[in-house]
Structure formats: C-alpha cells, structure tokens
Image: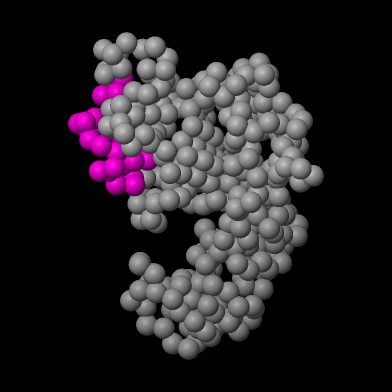
Amino acid sequence: MGLRLKDLTVHYGSVAAVSDVEMSIEDGEVVALLGPSGCGKSTLLRAVAGLERASSGTVSWDGADLAGVPVHRRGFGLVFQDGQLFPHRDVAGNVAFGLRMHGVDRKHQAERVAELLELVGLPGYGARRTTELSGGEQQRVALARALAPRPKLLLLDEPLSALDRALREQLAMDLAVLLRRAGATALVVTHDHDEAFTLADRVALMRKGKLVQTGTPAEVWRRPADAEVAAFLGCTVIVDGVVADGRATSSLGSVPAPGVVDGPVRLGLRASALRTDPAGQLTGEVLQRVHRSDHVRLLVRLDTGPEVEATAPVTAALTSHTRFTLDPDGIAFIT
C-alpha cells in the first residue's frame, strides 16, 4: 500500500506551512515534491519523517498511522543536501552505520557495503576518508548509507542542490537509475523541475503549503494546472487561443494540441517554443541575445504579437529582423 497522507497540516505558530495535503506513494514508486523555495515542501518531508509534528491529519504506512512512531522506528531513510556524512569514519564505516544500528553482523555488513558501493558507482572506495571525496561522490555515499538498511521509504531533501549545474544534471540521471535498480520507494524534494522530471514517476507540485497539481512528468509539463504553474515551469509568455479538431490556433499560428478538448485555451510559451527558421511564418525584431553552451537564447519582439523568448543555434546568422517557427514541444496548454 505504501505511504498515505490525509489532510496533513503543519503549523508554525499561526502560519500553515503545510495545509490539508493529500498524497500517496505506492511501493516502488518515486515521487518528486516540486515547488519554489518556501512553499512548504521540506516541511512536508520532515513531517513524513517524523521530524515535524503534524497539527492535524495523518501520515500512514500500509494503513498504519505513524503519529506515535518516533523517527528511528519508522524504517525510513533520509538524505539531505549536504549528505551529513561522519567525517571521522571512512566510506565503508559511513555506509555500514545503519546496519550496525540494526545489529547486522560484520560479515553481512561487509557484503552489503560492497554491494551498495558497486550500485552507486564507487567500488573499492570503502577505505577512503569522506573528506577526500568530491561533492558528487559524497552524495553517492550518503545515498548508499540511506539504502543500506533497506528502508521502506527513502526521503531525499534537495539532495543535489549543493552541486554545480553540470554535476547536478549528471548525478540526477545516475540517481534515477540507482533508485530503479534498488527498487526504492522514494519522496524527493526539489525546486528544480528538470531534476524532478528526471527522477520521478510522478510529480507533485506545491505552492503556498498546498498541492496544486499531481501527475506524470509529461502530464505536468504539457498540461500545467494554471498560469502560475506554467510560469514556474518556464512559460514566459501566455497567449489566448482556441482548440478545434486537435489543433490550437492563436495570434502566433496553429500547432497540434493532442488530447486537449475543443474550446478556449491558453498557450504557455517556453523559450524552446519559438526557434529560428528561414522558412518560418513569424517575423520579429531581435532585442537581446544571450549565448548558452549549446544555443543562443533570444528576446524577440514579434511583428504580430508580444515580446517572447526564442532559441537559435550558436552558428545562426541573426539579423535585426529574423524569421521564426513554432515548435509544439515548447508549448504548454492551460485549459
């Protein structure tokens, strides 16, 4: 049955940091709790762990209420953004810590440590000091330590946020593979939608203490619940349109809208929704350009519409007036 939250509320004084949250996580499922800083997602995770006391509502596992169960008896594993490794223990000593607490004998400790270091891509690292490791390696050790006792639920609070962007992206992909290989049931807190969509089977988006949308990454990305969600997910401009016979038409043209019901719709445009194309039907004045590693991001004033962001290849020859085309993959539909 897994984890169930029902009407969960957490107050700090008169302020409701978490308000009437209902959510479930099935065995073997990875759910990302996504939202901006201060929205209550870490408080929610801490309430699940037992580190924060719920003001009302319930946290249950397989139907059993956990209200009276202390943190160390819930059988949950925790990983925080700084790893919180023991600097006086080597890598093996860190990974084996939970096993010792559970009374596992040394032989089986060593076997489990070796198994987990192999799983997280650090075979042979057991004798190393944690202070000799890179940030990414330390987080892998923290994950191995949390997985060692085979927790019922793994709770990860911004586990990659302390790392630089390139390492964070790589480790997010690695972590997604590791969680599946371990068959872990996990709740991951993050403010980074790329990270959430890489890691999770489902995404639960939080705002001002409440859950505002839950769905698969594709559902949330393509069909945000409202304009605020769309803006959080990178839609910088929203235009009105109408859907008929599987196509959405707006002042910018017509694009496929599979699965969207006929009628009024708002189109949320990400930077990837508009790209340079010599044969494009839209024209606009390039107001600003910013070079990224593999593309150029533009600010464009369209001749027939608002100022929008767009993308171009690094090698593109841009003029003050440039042609563009709409890319449906960069468009979200808000109904």
Would residue 2 be seen by someone viewing this image from the given angle?
no
Q: Position of residue 100 (x, y in %)?
A: 37, 17
Q: Position of residue 46 (x, y in %)?
A: 60, 35
Number of residue marks: 0
Relative to 234, is 162 on the left or the right?
left
Residue 5 horizontal side relative to residue 37, left or right: right
Residue 238's place in the image compared with 123, above or below, is: below
Q: Nearer the viewer, residue 334 or 26?
A: 26
Q: Quadrant of residue 8?
A: top right
Residue 330, image x and y in percent?
A: 53, 61
Residue 109 showing in the rendered view: yes
Vertical order, 46 against 109 (above or below): below
| Outermost residue to the right | 14
What coloring was used for the rendering?
A: one colour
Q: Is residue 123 magenta?
A: yes
Per the rendered image, the range of residues in magenta is 112-141
Front position in the image: 101 or 24: 101
Q: Nearer the viewer, residue 302 or 112?
A: 112
Magenta: main secondary structure: helix
Q: Is residue 170 left or right of residue 31?
A: left
Q: Residue at x 49, y 32 (%)?
A: 78
Residue 233 vertical placement versus 294 (above, below): above
| Quadrant of the image occupied by residue 24 | top right
Residue 177 located within the stretch drawn in magenta: no
Q: Residue at x 65, y 45 (%)?
A: 40
Q: Position of residue 84 (x, y in %)?
A: 42, 38
Where residue 255 sits, quadrant-wise, is bottom right
Q: Residue at 55% across / 64% down in the picture?
A: 270
Question: For the view shown, which residue lies furthest in the front direction?
Answer: 88
Q: Quadrant of the N terminus?
A: top right
Placement of the C terminus among the 4 image quadrants: bottom right
Q: Residue at x 25, y 37 (%)?
A: 129
